[in-house]
Amino acid sequence: MGTSSRCSRAARTSRLVNASSSGRTSRKTAPCSALATISTTPSSTRSHVVETVLPTAGRIKDRRTEVSRILCVHGVGQQRECPDTLHAEWFPALSDGCLLAGEQLSAADVTCVFYGNLFRPPGRALAVGDPMIAPEDLDEFEAELLGVWWQEAARVDSAVVAPDAQTLVATPPTVQRALRALSGSSFFAGLADRALLFDLRQVRRYFQEPEVRQAAQQALAAAMTPEVRVVVGHSLGSVVAYETLCAHPAWSVEMLLTLGSPLGIRHLIFDRLQPAPALGSPDDPQGIWPESVGRWVNIADKGDVVALEKDLRRRFGSRVDGYLVSNGATAHGIRPYLTAAETGRAIVQGLDVR
């Protein structure tokens, strides 16, 4: 999928430098944050876990720099964060994961791309927090995605009543049944109905509101420099990363690392991607390989409901390397994903390529 047409590293780097000088300023030092703004202008199955071997102190490479080599793109539910608070959460965990793989990072190595502000409601007198969303307010897209999460949660968690289970209690409307069932899920433990519904709406808005989609991708594009070697996308952030990298084939990124990614969910996510899946057959389509990327590693927890399709090779080809990890009780949490040795190894592999 695009191997023969992928340009050499030198050529792609040259094009990125040229693009930077002609379209935007190339920075020698990248900031540790990048903020999204909405423009007013219209717009065969295999998974494996590699045994972890902690390197000795003498084998750890200290190549800390003062430029960002790693861009991180967050997922849903981050609207009350900001670039610096995300960096404070992501960097220590990511640094520890890389340390397991023998690489010492500095805070300047990592830039957190931030687009959560697109979903934060503006302040208003005598009211705070997110707008109230009731179960009956969900549109068809949101209700269908909730149903997909419910079905997957029931598959991986015996405490969750399956959508098709026969019970002796009165059956409420489908959305309310889903919320009631998911309240007993270890995956959604601690997440109020209101927060869950708001997360659903963020996914729907990204796919159905072009200005939101464009602004999120522009935040990543603004942070890109010739020094960047690795792009990490978590949850919805993996969609933002994938689509942005596809849109800029002249960039030179060694490693795309997706964590807890929903990219493989048919109809709701996969079939709505830009560029649209154009390979394979109509019944079994395959997505486009991002030409700006040298390698792609996808990591998922076996109990991560959001990462419904754990192995992305069926959707994006055999060049995607896939790993299953165990994140414990927080299957979709970013911290255990980042501290996993498999994550650190993928990042170090991206940084090691010259």
Image (cartoon, rainbow, N blue to C red):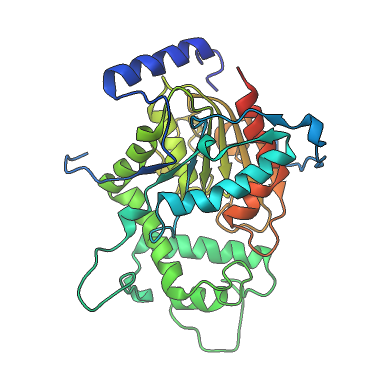
Q: Is residue 218 visible?
A: yes
The tally of labels here is 0
Location of residue 185 with respect to 311 vertically, above or below: below
* Residue 46 visible in the shown view: no
Residue sitting at x 59%, y 59%: 305
Q: If the image is split into quadrants, where does the C terminus sit?
A: top right
Q: Residue at x 56, y 17 (%)?
A: 3
Q: Quadrant of residue 82?
A: bottom left
**In the displayed image of the protein, which residue is found farthest to the bottom?**
169
Residue 343 percent coordinates (x, y): 66, 41
Instruction: Between residue 165 and residue 264, name the one nearer to us.
Output: 264
**Residue 29 place in picture, x, y as percent:** 43, 29
Name the foreground residue: 195 vs 97. 97
Q: Nearer the viewer, residue 232 or 201?
A: 232
In this rendering, position of residue 125 left or right of residue 169: left
Q: Residue at x 42, y 62 (%)?
A: 199
Place residue 166 in its image quadrant.
Answer: bottom right
Q: Nearer the viewer, residue 323 or 228?
A: 228
Name the quadrant of the N terminus.
top right
Q: Is residue 21 left or right of residue 94?
A: left
The picture places residue 325, in percent across and down from the top left corner, at: 71, 49
